[in-house]
Amino acid sequence: MWTDIIMVLLTLTNMVALGTSRIRACIRIVAFQGVSLGLLPLLTHPFAPDLLIFAILNTLLKGVVFPVILVRTLRQLNVWKEEDPYVDYGLSLLAGPFVLALSWWISSRLPLPAAISSSMLIPVALFTLFVGFFLIVSRKKALFQVLGYLVLENGIYAFGVAVAFQQPLLIELGILLDVFVGVFVMGIAMFHISRQFDHIDTDRLSSLRS
Amino acid sequence: MINLKEIFQPLAAMLLAPLLFGIINRVKAFFAGRRGQPLLQSYYDLWKLLNKGAVYSTTTSWVFRASPVVCLAAVVIVACIIPLGARNVISFSGDFVLAVYLLGLMRFFMVIAALDTGSSFEGMGASREVQFSMLAEPALFIGLAVLARLTSSLSLAQAFSSVTPQVWASHCATLLLVAAAFVIILLAENARIPVDDPNTHLELTMIHEVMVLDNSGPDFAFIMYAAAIKLWLFSVLLVRVLLPVGSMPGWASVLVSITAVLLIAVLVGIVESCMARLRLIKVPHLLFSAAALAILALVFAFRD
Amino acid sequence: MILLLILIPFAAGLASLLIRQDLWRRRLLIAAALCHAGLVAACWIRTAQPLWSGWFQIDPTAQFFLTITDILFVAAAFYAAGYLKAEKYAMSKDFEEHQLFVNAPEAVFTACLLLFLSTMTMVITSQHFGMLWVAMEATTLVSAPLIYFHRHHRSLEAAWKYLLICSVGIAISLLGNFFLAISASGSGVGVVSLMRQDLIAHSSQLLDSWVKAAFIFFIVGYGTKMGLAPMHTWLPDAHSESPSLVSALLSGALLNCAFVGILRAFEVTSAAGLQEFARDLMILFGLVSIAFAALFIIGQADYKRMLAYSSVEHMGILALGIGLGGAAVFGSMFHAMNHSLTKAALFMVAGNILAAYKTKTANDVQGMFSAIPKSAVLWTMGILAITGFPPFGVFMSEFTILKAAIDSGRYYISAIFLLLLAVIFIGISAMAFKMAQGRPEKPLEVAPERALSVWPPALLLAGVLVLGLYVPSKLSDVMHTVAVFFGGGR
C-alpha cells in the first residue's frame, strides 16, 4: 500500500519534472523524489540497523545536500528558467504517459523471479529511468542535464530496491559517494561553463565537432 | 409513467444551475472583503434578459439566431444523461459518447454563431475556444474511458454507481488522477480562472465572453443559462468520480450529490480568488497536463 | 600488498595537494609511480594476498592490465615532470582562438593524476562487480579535472561531455549490476553475492534472460567508457583537448580499465552458457567501432583527434578479438598491450609537436624532420607501429586476430576487418607522413627537445618493437592464462 503510494508520487514527480521550466522547482521535485525513495527500503525490507543508516544517509544526501549544492550553483549562475528546450514542455508532458505505458509493457515482458512488494515498482522505476534520459537529451541548460542524471540515478536506485536486492553496505556507500562527488564536480564544471561562456546552454558547447 | 426520481435529476440541474454562479460570486466577494451580489442574482439577470427584446446585426444569418436555442437544447439533453443519483432519464450503453458529443455540438454552434457575426473579436474568441477545447475534449474522453474500464460498464449511470468505496480502496491513485484531470477540464470548459476570466472587461483576453458579445435579450439569457447548466454538469461529473455515492440509497445519493456540487462551486470560487488568470500561451500547457494526467490514469487502469 | 597499491598513489595524491614546491611535487609523482610499478613488478615474482576476503585480488587478468597501466604511468610521470616545467601558469594565449587562459593549479593536476592511478588500480583488481562499478565511476570523476587543465572553453566543453556521457554510461552499467543480481537471486539457492568467483561457481543456476540483459547493459555502459562506437562521442573531444600526457593515460590506461569491466562481465556471461551470444555482441560492437573510426579518420584535419579515433578503432579490435574466440583472444590481450604502449607514445610525441608548432591542424605542421628531428623519428615510428606495420608488436597482434578469424572460417568478418584496416592505414599515413616531411612554412622558434619529452615515448616505442620480435615467455604465459579465462585457446 505505502509502496504503491510512493510509486504514484514518483510518477507524478516525474511528470512535473517533465513539465516544468523552472529549474528551482525541478530541483525541489528531484529532492522530493530522492527523499521518498530513500524511505522506500525501510518499507520493503525487513528492518536492519545498516539499512537504517543507509536510508538516513541516502535521504540526507538526496533531500538536503544535493538541493543545497544545486541551488547554490543556481544562485551563482543566476539562471532560473529554461525558455527554449529541444522538446517543448507540453509535448514532454504528453510524451510522459506514453513512456510510462512503454515501461509497463517492457516490465510485463520481464520474467521476475524475486518476490517484489508491488507490481508498480519495476515499471515506475523504468519510467523514472527513461524520464531521466529524456531530460538529459531534451534540455539545453546544463543544470537540467544534471537533474536528468539525478532522476536517472533515482530510477536505477528504485530498480535496485524493487528487486529486493541488497548489496553490501560498503558498496552502497561507495555508489552514494560517487554520485555525490559526481554532482559536486558537475556543479563546479557548470560554474566554470557560466564563467567561460556567460551561459549554461549546452547546445552552444559546439566548437568540437567530428 | 415517468419515474419521479429520474425526471428530478434534469429538473434539479435546470433549477439549481444558476445558483452556482451566485455561490461563486459570493465566495469571491467574501475573499475580496465585499458583501457581494445576492445569491439569486443570476436568476434576476435571466429574468431581466428574458423580458427584453433581442437586437440582431444585419450581417448575421439564421445561424446566429439558432445558436442559443441549440446550445440550450443540447445542454438540457446532456442534463438528462449525466446522473445525479442512480439512473437518469436517458441511459444506455455508451451514453457518455452522446453526452460529450452534445457538448461538442453546443460548442460548435457557439463558435459558428460567433464567426457569423463577422466581428474580429468574436472570431478571435472562437479560435481560442476551439484551440483549447481541442485539448480538453480528449482529456475528458480519456478520463471517462478510465472510469468505463475500472467499472467495466459503458453507461454513465452504471459506471458511476459502481464507484464504490472498494473501488476507491483498490484504485485510489487512478481515480485521483482522473479527478485531477476533471478539475482542470471543469475550469477550462466553463471559462473559469485560470483559463479564462468571466469578469474581465478586456475583449483581447477573453475567450468565452467575447464570443457572445453580440447576443442580447432572450438569446443571451439562453446562453447564460446553458453555461450555468454546463458548469453544473461538469461539477456533477467531478462529484461522481470523487464520491462513492452510488452505494447510498436512492434519494440520499441525490441529496449528497447536490450538496457536493454546491461545495464545488465554493471551491471554484476559492480557486478564482487565489489564482490569477494564466497567460494565453500557458493555457495549452495546463490542458496538456490534464490530458497527461488522464492518460496516466488510463495506463494505471490497464495495468491489471 | 594490494592495499599498498591502492593507498600509495592515494596518499601521494593527497600529499601533493599540500606540498608547496613544484619540484618536490614532481619528484613525489615520479616516486609514487616508481613505487607502484615496483610493487606490481613484485607481483610477477610472488602472488599477492587477496584483500578483504577476496574483494580485491591480483588474478592474472589484473596482473596483466596492472602491468600495462604501470608502464604507461611511469612513462607519463617522467613526461609530466618535463611537461609541467615547461608550462606557464600566468595568463597565456590560446593558439587557436587567441583568447587568454590560465592553467589549473599544478597541485590539483598532480593530485588528480595520482588519484587516477589509485582508482584505476581499484578497477583492475576488484573482483566484486559492485566495487568495480564504484571504482569505474571514480576514475571518471578524478580524470575530468585532468582534461580541464588548460582552462579554456574547448577543454571545458570536452570535460563536460566526458563527465556527463561517461556518468550516464556508467549509470547504465549499474543497471547491469542489478540485472546480474536478479539473475543470481532467482535461482532458489539463496542470494549469490556479486563476487566474480561466486557468480562463476553458481553459473549454472543463473537465469539466462537476465544474464543476457545484464551483459547488454554492461557492454553499453562500460563500452561508453571504453569508447566503443556509437557511444564513443566523448572520446575524440576529451583526447584532443586534454594535455597530451593525459590523453596518453586516457587512451592507454583508462580505456583498458573499461575493457577489464567488460571482460569480467563477459567471463560470467560465458560461464552461464551464453558465450555465443556474448561473442556475437562483441564482434558487432568491435566491427562497428572500427568502421566508425575509419569513417572519421579519413579527412580528419586535427592530428590529436585522428589519434583519438585510432583509439576507437583499436578498442574495436580488442572487442573483435574477444568476440572471435580461440587464438584471437590471446591476440586481443597482446593487442591491448601493444596498443597502449604505442598510443601513449604517439600522444606524447603529439604533445611535443603541439608545443613546437602551436597548432593541432595537420596541414599547418610541416618539416618536422628539420624542426624537431627526434620527435619526427618517433612520430614516424609510432605511426608505422599503430597502422600495423611489421615488425612492430601491433602487427603481430592484429595478424593473430586476423588469422584466428580466417582459421575459424569467418571470411566475411576477416574481409571487412582487413578492408577497414586498409582504409585506416591510408587515412592515418596520408596525414601523418606529410607532417614529418617537407620544410616548415615559416621559420619556427623551437626550443631544443628536452630529454624528458623524448625518452619516455622512445622507450615505449622500443618496447613495442621488442614485443613484435620477441615476447618474453613469462608474459606470453600470463597472456595465455588470461586468454583462457575469456574463452580463448592456443
Image (cartoon, coloured by chain):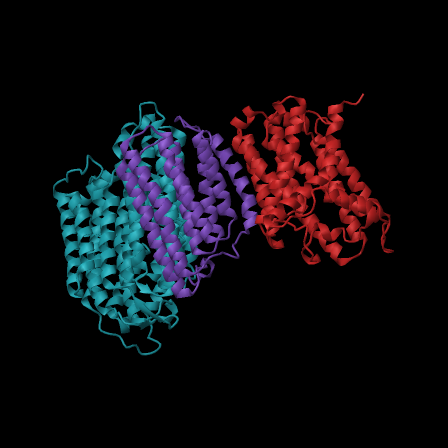
Chain colours: A purple, B red, C cyan
Horizontal side of residue C208 vs B114, given as left or right: left
Report x, y in % for residue C378: 25, 63
Asked whether B213 or A68 is in front, the reply is: B213
Q: Is residue B223 visible?
A: no
Residue B266: horizontal and vertical position, in percent? 62, 41
Q: Nearer the viewer, residue C389 or C235?
A: C235
- Tell me what residue is drawn at x 76 percent, y 22 percent: B3
Q: Is residue A24 visible?
A: yes
Task: Residue at 27%, 32% (x, y): give it.
Answer: A49
Which of the two residues, C110 or B54, is positioned nearer the viewer here?
B54
The mark tally for this picture is 0
Q: Position of residue A106 (x, y in %)?
A: 49, 34
Q: Residue furthest bottom?
A: C443
Residue found 19% across the figure and 45% down from its top = C475
- Left or right: residue A45 versus residue B144 is left
Where residue B296 sits, quadrant-wise, is top right
Instruction: Tell me the quadrant of the picture where the N terminus of chain B can be found.
Output: top right
C265 w.r.t. C457: above or below:
above
Residue C466 percent coordinates (x, y): 20, 53
Q: Residue furthest front?
A: B35
